[in-house]
């Protein structure tokens, strides 16, 4: 067949502009946007004709042109960031936004950001204030530190710390701690960007105190300890504790910096998890500066929290990078609320979703699995559905070895493939993300919120019954 015939059969823009459906699109949205989309969709077909010889396929595309224009215009105006129902069981899922915020905190945030606020205004004396002032004392009270501040994320925090404390100086780090965290945060690269000189000591599996001692010289700017977060080396290993590094730093009058990664403020071993050193432990050990993420185990907004000695924090506050990395009012507002919860550990566990999901009672998860299972009873002829044991992960590079006992609902539809069910859920307006294992779709109930069970069951029934 002659490709020219295909080219000629594409409707012209003027003709399309007279189509009823297109006219109603223009009435609902903007003419310019619709015209742009028409041109783009026509161009897509021309491109297809050029490269594709499947004429039936191209004819179908031409017949569906108005439909596709309509979909594309709708898509231009609909929000791309949407709520996702997390059936993966991974609590700090980096791709799904890490920590979630409670409705109570989000409602207060909404109040603050839809009006003016005292973000940088001291109401007592009517003068300019500091955006950190709303939570600095609070963080100090909780962690035992002298001073605190926050920037956009922990990657920025580490850069700011190194650039303020060790610019043009040597920073000593164990080879066992030269980590790469998701999204290409690599300690050696960050070091370079901060103009600090990396001095590697020890080996991948073993670093001794004397390795630090031997590396210290007049150019040493800091001793840095980095939490290995997302991996564990097992077997014949040795690392130097933060306490020993701090003592060595003091003896030699060299500041000690720690990138503690997740930044836990409560002893999680009380809740049956493996012991994870807290920020308070590091402060007690005498660390000069410690930084951690806001949206990992802390359970707050994306942020990098820096705590420690006032003389160093004051220096950081004056560093021009602080202006580049500064948090906005959304973050400042939530940080204050999150840290207020930590004034009492029980409140933190109950009111911070990340902590309540990690410590969620297995009985409660099982109860929710049963609720979903019963709601799906109408599918019993078209799908195999079961409640099974499963293991959830914490995620976000936190406690990588930890697995939490959980319950999942597994679904194998009989009238479509499991992959197709997974895809339909993922492409839904309010998407559901699960995983496939053994030809079953697995929905881990640990990360399904109470008010999502009903929505999820309706979606499943709607998709599988169709
Ligand atoms: C996660 C992590 C970072 C990066 O923190 P972000 O808040 O994601 O920027 C840095 N260092 C360690 C050890 C981490 O675990």
Image: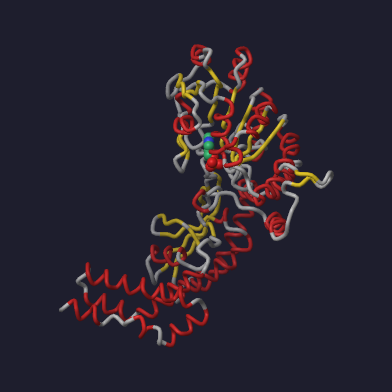
Q: Position of residue 306 (x, y in %)?
A: 63, 35
Viewer-side residue, 254 vs 446: 254
387 vs 29, nearest the viewer: 29
In the image, residue 143 lies at what x, y percent? 70, 33
Name the image quarter holding the N terminus. Answer: bottom left
Quadrant of the image for the C terminus?
bottom left
Front residue (pair 280, 167): 167
Left or right of residue 332, residue 22 in this image: left
| In this view, 90 is above or below 67 | above
Q: How many discs mark residues in the rendered view?
A: 0
Residue occupying the point 46% across, 26% down? 176
145, above or below 378, in the image: above
**Is the image coloured rainbow, by chain, by secondary structure, or in one colour?**
secondary structure
Quadrant of residue 133 within the rendered picture: top right
Q: Please say if 119 is above or below 273.
A: below
Percent x, y of residue 80: 50, 63
Q: Residue at x 58, y 31 (%)?
A: 161
């Amino acid at each position: 067949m002659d490709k020219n015939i295909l080219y000629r059969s594409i409707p012209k823009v003027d003709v399309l502009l007279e189509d009823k459906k297109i006219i109603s699109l223009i009435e609902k949205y903007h003419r310019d946007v619709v015209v742009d989309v028409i041109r783009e969709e026509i161009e897509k077909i021309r491109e297809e004709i050029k490269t594709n010889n499947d004429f039936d396929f191209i004819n179908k595309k031409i017949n569906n042109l108005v439909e596709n224009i309509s979909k594309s215009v709708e898509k231009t105006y609909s929000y791309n960031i949407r709520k996702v129902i997390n059936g993966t069981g991974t609590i700090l899922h980096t791709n799904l936004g890490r920590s979630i915020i409670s409705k109570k905190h989000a409602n207060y945030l909404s109040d603050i950001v839809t009006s003016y606020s005292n973000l940088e205004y001291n109401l007592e004396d009517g003068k300019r204030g500091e955006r950190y002032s709303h939570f600095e004392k609070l963080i100090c009270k909780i962690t035992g530190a002298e001073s605190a501040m926050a920037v956009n994320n922990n990657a920025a925090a580490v850069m700011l710390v190194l650039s303020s404390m060790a610019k043009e100086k040597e920073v000593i780090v164990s080879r066992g701690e030269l980590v790469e965290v998701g999204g290409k945060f690599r300690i050696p690269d960050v070091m370079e960007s901060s103009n600090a000189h990396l001095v590697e000591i020890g080996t991948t599996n073993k670093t001794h105190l004397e390795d630090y001692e031997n590396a210290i010289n007049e150019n040493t700017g800091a001793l840095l300890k980095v939490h290995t977060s997302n991996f564990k080396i097992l077997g014949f290993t040795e690392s130097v504790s933060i306490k020993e590094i701090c003592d060595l730093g003091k003896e030699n009058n060299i500041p000690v910096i720690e990138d503690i990664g997740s930044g836990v403020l409560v002893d999680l071993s009380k809740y049956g998890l493996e012991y994870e050193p807290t920020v308070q432990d590091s402060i007690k050990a005498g660390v000069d500066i410690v930084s951690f993420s806001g949206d990992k185990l802390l359970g707050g907004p994306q942020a990098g929290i820096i705590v420690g000695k006032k003389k160093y924090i004051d220096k950081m506050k004056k560093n021009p990078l602080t202006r580049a990395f500064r948090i906005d009012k959304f973050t400042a507002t939530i940080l204050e609320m999150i840290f207020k919860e930590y004034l009492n550990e029980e409140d933190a566990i109950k009111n911070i979703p990340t902590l309540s999901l990690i410590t969620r009672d297995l009985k409660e998860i099982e109860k929710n699995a049963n609720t979903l299972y019963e709601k799906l009873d109408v599918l019993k002829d078209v799908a195999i559905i079961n409640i099974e044991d499963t293991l959830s992960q914490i995620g976000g590079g936190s406690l990588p070895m930890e697995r939490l006992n959980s319950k999942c609902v597994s679904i194998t539809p009989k009238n479509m493939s499991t992959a197709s069910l997974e895809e339909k859920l993922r492409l839904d307006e309010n998407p559901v993300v699960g995983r496939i294992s053994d030809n079953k779709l697995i929905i881990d109930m640990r990360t399904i919120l109470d008010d999502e069970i009903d929505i999820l069951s309706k979606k499943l029934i709607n998709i599988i019954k169709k």
